[in-house]
Image (spheres, rainbow, N blue to C red):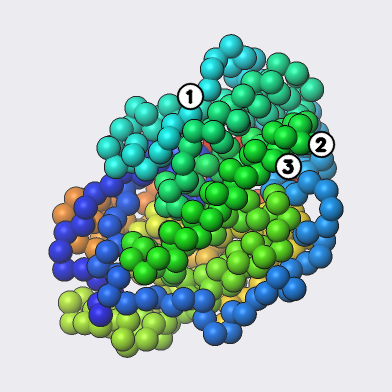
Amino acid sequence: MNLVNSTGNKVRYSFIFIGGIIFFVVALFSVNWSFLRSYNLAPIPEGSDITPSDVNPDSVSSGDGVVFFSDKAVETIRKNGERNPQIKQWLQMQFEIARASHNRAPRPVKSLAELKSNLDLSASAQVEDEFNRLIALALDARMNGNKDSLKTAREYLLAWAGVYEPNGYPNVEVAMSGYIMAYELARKNLSGEDRATIDNFLDKLFIAQKENVNRPDFDGQKWGNKWSLHASNVAMVAFLERDREKIAYVKNIYFDQLSHNIQPAGKLADFYPKELLGNVFERFPFLKDRTYEKGVTFDFIHRDALLYHRASIEPLYVIALIAKNNGEDWYLLKGEKGQTLEWAFDFLVPYATGEEEHYEFKDTLIDFDTSNKRQTWFKPQDGISTLTLATGLYPKYKQYANINLLWSSNMPVFVTYEQ
């Protein structure tokens, strides 16, 4: 049982929302993690016995569920547009996109996985455009009462619900986050029949995800970013539906990530059991005495890349934000060793400010990263983007925030924060 692989890995392009927030990085690589199947990096630990009865009753009360866009949040967007010129400009652009889409027919696809496996970047870009339009349509309908935008958004939502077949792969179906956001914006203005159709589709999405990641041969493990992505994907469905059982399932994964993905300061042997480490110190002697700062993630240790650190913690942030929007302070929860999500964002700060530099993938444990020459200096602005996103739960990061460095597709969530 080894922490690392000794053979090359198959390259697969992913269009992925880093951390679950809504943007595509079309050329981000994903590695075949089949070498990790020789062990199970922890099913839910014994201590993680969260049950539906542990879920805040306010999260499952009557009425529409909340992901990001409660009535209060929509009003906050409106006020932010009045006060902030950049947000005002962004909103105007969304309304223009919406109205330019009224006569454009939806273009659903049957499988996002096929686009990924075929490396079809042009088709991936079309899917990105599809969901950007859908969000713009739903936003225009919700904020301005535009009936034509609502009509077109409905057509898009039903077309995708009728054509797309969920496959359950988190790093592929994170793209569906855009669909769920748009549905949340439009939901209260759709008929009961339409809502039932779309809700049934989202249930299929949830079930496919849950069944896939719990397969013994799933090419991911429960201490890395694929499980973070999975949890953020299904969290949107769980809270939108106000389903106590689904919410408990998400909370268990979130707690597991706090306990095993994010670590206190120390060495590798302090974090993970001997049977997991295998011969890692023989293959990589430098790891034995390397000390990590508090807040380091499994992905950073494994890949020696802040890219993967960010890809691991941003989905967890999304989960915590959704929970907060439903009266649950998961962002304050602590793992088995006292770990918090905030630790992982603090870990990023010196790299975002430029106080410290990091050469990405230099000491990666994955052959693929080395053979494909992924090494490059980490760009501080990418760290600032992540910290800007995190200001919704952690105001202390506002001192670093820069809306100009925020990924443009993160804006639908960012604009719901009180500025």
Q: What's the residue type where badge 1 is placed?
A: Arg
Find disc 3 in the rendering and name its residue: 69
Q: Give the mark toward the camera: 2 or 1.
A: 1
> Which element type, helix, strand or loop, lies under badge 1?
loop
Task: State the residue in front, 256 or 206.
Answer: 206
> Which element type, helix, strand or loop, lies under badge 3?
loop
Tag on residue 29? none
Q: Is residue 309 above or below residue 399?
A: below
Quarter of the image for residue 179 reads top right
Q: Earlier in the sequence, mark 2 or mark 3?
A: 3
Q: What's the residue type where badge 3 is placed?
A: Phe
Find disc 2 in the rendering and name its residue: 75
Quadrant occupied by the N terminus: bottom left
Quadrant occupied by the C terminus: top right
Q: Dot 1: within a 10 Å radius of its alpha carbon, few (fewer than 14), some, or many (20 or more) residues?
A: few
Q: CA distance from mark 2 to mark 3?
A: 9 Å
Q: Position of residue 356 (x, y in %)?
A: 41, 60
Q: Position of residue 101 (x, y in %)?
A: 58, 16
Q: Residue at x 18, y 82 (%)?
A: 282
Q: Give the mark toward the camera: 1 or 3.
A: 1
Q: Is residue 37 above or below residue 313?
A: below
Q: Give the mark toward the camera: 2 or 3.
A: 3
Find disc 1 in the rendering and name its residue: 107
Residue 302 in the figure: left or right of residue 350:
left
Q: Is residue 414 visible?
A: no
